[in-house]
């Protein structure tokens, strides 16, 4: 199971940033393709190709897409887990890094995916509630690190590094260092918090209060 998970995560780290890149570029291409509507219907490219190759009704197989995606992700993880696969992905990423617009999208999506699926014991493992950007206003955040070296020594206290994502795009945001006593740890999972952020707060995860032994949470003392 550990090996299976490792392959799946390796496959996801390839397909998530690539999928996000293709999705955004595909949206732009789709908008530009609307100009084809100015051509008469009989000369539409889709009509010409349909007449050339003939028409075949698609066959819908319920659940087949889920199985296919699972197999593709798993095989991708197996491929990139060896030397040849890593070299291939390295060359592919080097090529994308030379394309200005694609480079920005792919790098942001890849970095975010690596953080989310990291095996680190601290990275993106806790969802936090912070009083940010000022006292009395609360924002969702993710714990990214607690071993801050010089930052912790110079602050003179125990601090936590947090990532506060923006909505609806959680791949951008701000990194802030917060005293541990000002941090409220939530019970919600990382994927639940991401859904809430992406949905602009519309999708709120279900919380079972009776299953939480740490309640009530103590809010930070404003007098300090």
Image: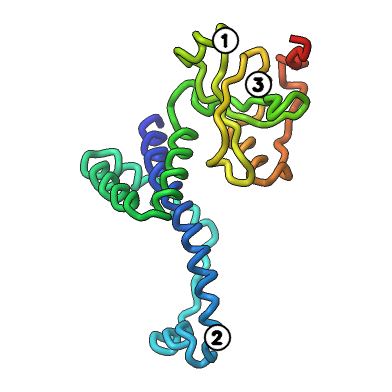
**Measured from the top left, where is residue 199 in percent x and y?**
67, 46
| Label 3: how many Cα within 10 Å (few below 14, some 14–19, many 20+) | some
Q: Secondary structure at mark 3?
A: strand
Q: Which residue does the numbered mark 2 point to in the structure image?
A: 38
Task: Name which quarter of the figure residue 219 lies in.
Answer: top right
Cα–Cα gap, marks 2 and 3: 56 Å
In the image shown, does 5 or 36 lie closer to the viewer? 36
Q: Secondary structure at mark 1?
A: loop
Instruction: Identify the mark nearer the N-term, 1 or 2.
Output: 2
Task: Name which quarter of the figure residue 53 lies in.
Answer: bottom left
Instruction: Identify the mark nearer the N-term, 2 or 3.
Output: 2
**Measured from the top left, where is residue 192 in percent x and y?**
63, 36
Look at the image and name its color scheme.
rainbow
Question: Going by the image, does 96 lie left or right of 187?
Answer: left
**Measured from the top left, where is residue 149 in percent x and y?**
45, 13
Residue appearing at x 41%, y 38% in the figure: 9
Return the mark for residue 185: 3
| Label 1: how many Cα within 10 Å (few below 14, some 14–19, many 20+) | some
In the image shown, does 25 or 195 lie closer to the viewer? 25
Quarter placement of the N terminus? top left
Quarter placement of the C terminus? top right
Measured along the vertical axis of the image, is residue 92 above or below residue 132?
A: below
Q: Which residue does the numbered mark 1 point to in the structure image?
A: 158
**Measured from the top left, where is residue 205 in percent x and y?**
70, 36
Measured along the vertical axis of the image, is residue 140 above or below residue 197?
A: above
Residue appearing at x 48%, y 16% in the figure: 148
């Amino acid at each position: 199971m550990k090996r299976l998970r490792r392959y799946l995560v390796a496959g996801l780290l390839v397909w998530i940033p690539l999928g996000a890149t293709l999705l955004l570029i595909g949206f732009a291409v789709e908008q530009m393709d609307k100009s084809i509507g100015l051509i008469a219907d009989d000369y539409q490219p889709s009509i010409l190709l349909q007449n050339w190759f003939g028409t075949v009704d698609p066959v819908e197989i319920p659940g087949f897409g889920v199985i296919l995606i699972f197999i593709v992700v798993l095989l991708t993880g197996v491929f990139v887990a060896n030397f040849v696969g890593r070299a291939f992905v390295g060359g592919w990423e080097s090529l994308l890094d030379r394309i200005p617009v694609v480079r920005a999208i792919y790098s942001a999506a890849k970095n975010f995916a690596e953080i989310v699926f990291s095996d680190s014991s601290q990275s993106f493992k806790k969802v936090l509630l912070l009083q940010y950007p000022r006292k009395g206003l609360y924002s969702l955040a993710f714990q990214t690190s607690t071993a801050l070296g010089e930052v912790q020594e110079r602050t003179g206290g125990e601090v936590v590094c947090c990532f506060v994502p923006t909505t609806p795009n959680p791949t951008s945001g701000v990194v802030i260092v917060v005293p541990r006593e000002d941090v409220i740890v939530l019970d919600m999972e990382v994927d639940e918090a991401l859904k809430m952020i992406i949905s602009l707060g519309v999708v709120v995860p279900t919380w079972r209060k009776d299953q939480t032994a740490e309640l009530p949470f103590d809010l930070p003392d404003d007098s300090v």
